[in-house]
Amino acid sequence: MPIVAIVSFMTFAPVEGIWAWIVPLPDTVQEQVDDAVDHGLDGIIVYVDQAGQPPALYAAGWKNRAALVPADPRALFKIASISKLYIAVAATKLVHDQQLSLDDTLADLLPELIGRVEYANQITIRMMLQHRSGIPNYVDDEAFNWGEPLLAISENLNLVLDDPADFEPGTDYRYSNTNYLLLGTILDNVLGYDHQQYINEEILIPLGLTDTYGSLSNVALEEVVSGYYVGYDEDMKELDYVVPGGSMVATAKDVSVFLRALNDGSLLNDEEQAIYSSVYEYEHTGWVLGYHSIARYHKEIDTVVIQFVNTTGGDMELVTNVVYNRIVRILSKG
């Protein structure tokens, strides 16, 4: 695909985003979703799980723009970094079961990285979960191209091996996808099998989630929403991001059920919940070319709101965030 350093071309002129702050809120979520498409989004899916009310699905725009297939609120979507929540839960369960310790170091668990990752003997599982390891983010390397993702986990890791640390472990915070790449590898080694199988058995099956998958290769492409980048006609759907912490595919409903269970305590027991609370967050966003997702629980209105948008680039990230905030405002008005 002829997309080279596409992300560096992004400009955030807030032309479309400004409308959202100055026009009155519509009365309904569906009206807001419809309006969002008028401001440049190819397609949008929203799932709302509000306490005391039946869950509601909303959609507008296109699932596949070229084929003129309308947005399908039950379609699969690349949830990108929302995947990190599932890995953090899996790690929590293994720590609780004493198969892993938060104080285990990278050197203990992946000794082949001694001398290749700075401070490997000081970086702990806890630090990697919290993005406090100082390990550089492989997607920031000049050789990484979102439009031509590397198809092996080792290839992505190689981009940052032997690079200096961003900071001494535990002294600062910097979001790094490399942390969860390494965590996925560690979980595989501890389990003796693919950590996505563990996620399926310990998280998805107990919650009854049948529309969540570990990677794009596990699903039929026609079931996945097409993704678009401003200024390009290509469909980004076939781009496969294989690295743990960014590889998963799911429906909005499945993500909502998972997030509700994570936040209300029904997914983890009390001891597991205490471990999880000490290491990671309870909401997340996701971004890969053509796909922007937001998954949050809003305690003040006891509501989970999941939003999937299949347009990125230009000022569409701003539009996406503004639309999400307006939807929450509509729900808050009751």
Image (tube, grey):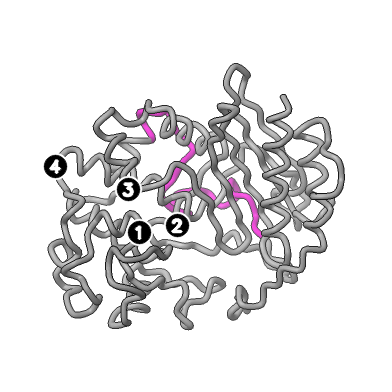
How dense is the environment of label 2, judged by Cα within 10 Å: few (below 14), some, or many (20 and up)? Answer: many
Seen at 45% across and 35% down, the residue is 258
Left or right side of 17 for 141: left
**Badge 4 or badge 3: first in the primary sequence:** 4
Left or right side of 334 for 179: left
Residue 207 belongs to the span the image colors magenta: yes
Mark closer to the observer (2, 1): 1
Q: Is residue 134 visible to us here?
A: yes
In the image, what residue type sits under mark 4? Answer: Gln
- Disc assigned to residue 246: 2
Say which quarter of the image contains residue 290.
bottom right
Left or right side of 93 for 112: left
The residue wearing badge 1 is 180
Residue 81: percent from left, percent from top: 47, 55
CA gap, disc 3 and disc 1? 13 Å
Seen at 27% across and 46% down, the residue is 91
Magenta segment: 204-227
Q: Secondary structure at mark 4?
A: loop
In the image, what residue type sits under mark 3? Answer: Val
The reply to whether the C-beta atoms of the residues labelled 4 and 1 are less than 8 Å apart is no
CA gap, disc 4 and disc 1? 20 Å
Q: Secondary structure at mark 1?
A: helix
**Badge 3 or badge 2: first in the primary sequence:** 2
Mark closer to the observer (3, 1): 3
The reply to whether the C-beta atoms of the residues labelled 2 and 1 are less than 8 Å apart is yes
Q: Secondary structure at mark 2?
A: loop
- Disc assigned to residue 98: 4
Mark closer to the observer (4, 3): 3
Residue 211: percent from left, percent from top: 49, 38
CA gap, disc 2 and disc 1? 9 Å
